[in-house]
Image (cartoon, rainbow, N blue to C red):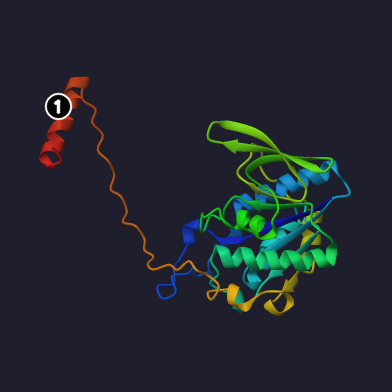
Amino acid sequence: MNILVCVKQVPDTTEIKIDPVTNTLIRAGVPSIVNPFDAYALEIAARIKDTMPDTRITLLSMGPPQAEAALKECLAVGGDQAYLVSDRAFGGADTLATSYTLKCAIDKLEELNGAFDLIFCGKQAIDGDTAQVGPEIAEHMDCPQITYGVEAKVEGDEVLVKRETGEGYEILAAKLPCVITVTKPSFNPRFPTIKSKMAANRARITTLAASDLPVDSTRIGLKGSPTKVKKSFTPPQKQGGVTIAEETCEASARKLFELLNTAHVI
């Protein structure tokens, strides 16, 4: 079984800063973490590997050189090899340009290591919350996709996925190869061992630049991004509410009426 897990290093959500000129995230000097949904995706892939020892997990990330740290974290908890797609030409990419670039990287990796049976992505990155890149990769590759997965197992030439819905869960089957996006399951990602962390720190991360990939230069980075951010801002902080706790419900209702009337709401 040959599995690919797409991983993104994202800014700590309490420290996000926006460049007022380009309207893109400022990543330099900002604490970064592995996107939590990608960590769940890796855990599900690792659980497949636990039951199928011949499984190999490849990690793929697109980002600045510092994203190597995220890949090494993932190598310590189940990954076997890792690749970083990094080039100034990829900067400022929206979801369409990002998914196209990742698809080109997947094509390159399949040339080197053979076709992938499963491709896992987190359902979304917490710095953008678009939930578009995984499904777009599936569309670029013209292969089946299952979104909002919380469990997965392989049976023959099919993958069975437990999928979260608004009404509960459903079990879906798809032929391999398949792209699966993962939401928060009922379990947490495993912790690395000291041995696995030491091995991950020594691991060599292969970097793929634009010149290494079969990309169309008009479809990458800002040039290949049809989505444009016109304005970004921090919403005003909401003031605390008012608690009404009179002795009776009727008294509370009268008090609420008085407050709304004074504020000219009614």
Answer with the quarter of the image where residue 50 lies.
top right
Q: Is residue 27 visible?
A: yes
> Which residue is at the far right?
54
| Quadrant, the C terminus | top left
Q: Is residue 225 above or below residue 54?
A: below
> Which residue is at the far front?
142
Q: Residue at x 43, y 67 (%)?
A: 229
Q: Residue at x 61, y 53 (%)?
A: 135
What is the x, y in percent for residue 221? 57, 73
Q: Residue at x 40, y 72 (%)?
A: 20
Q: Residues within 10 Å of mark 1 (few under 14, many from 20)?
A: few
Query: Mark 1 is on which residue type?
Result: Arg
Answer with the quarter of the image where residue 265 lies.
top left
Q: Residue at x 77, y 40 (%)?
A: 153
What is the x, y in percent for residue 59? 74, 59
In the image, 28 versus 266, the foreground residue is: 266
| Residue holding disc 1 | 254
Classify residue 109 as left or right of residue 125: right
What is the x, y in percent for residue 224? 55, 73
User: SS at mark 1?
Assistant: helix
Q: Is residue 3 above or below residue 170?
A: below
Q: Is residue 201 above or below residue 248?
A: below
What is the x, y in percent for residue 97? 58, 68
Q: Is residue 190 visible?
A: no
In the image, 256 versus 223, the foreground residue is: 223
Q: How many marks?
A: 1
Classify residue 96 as left or right of residue 246: right
In the image, 37 versus 77, the foreground residue is: 37
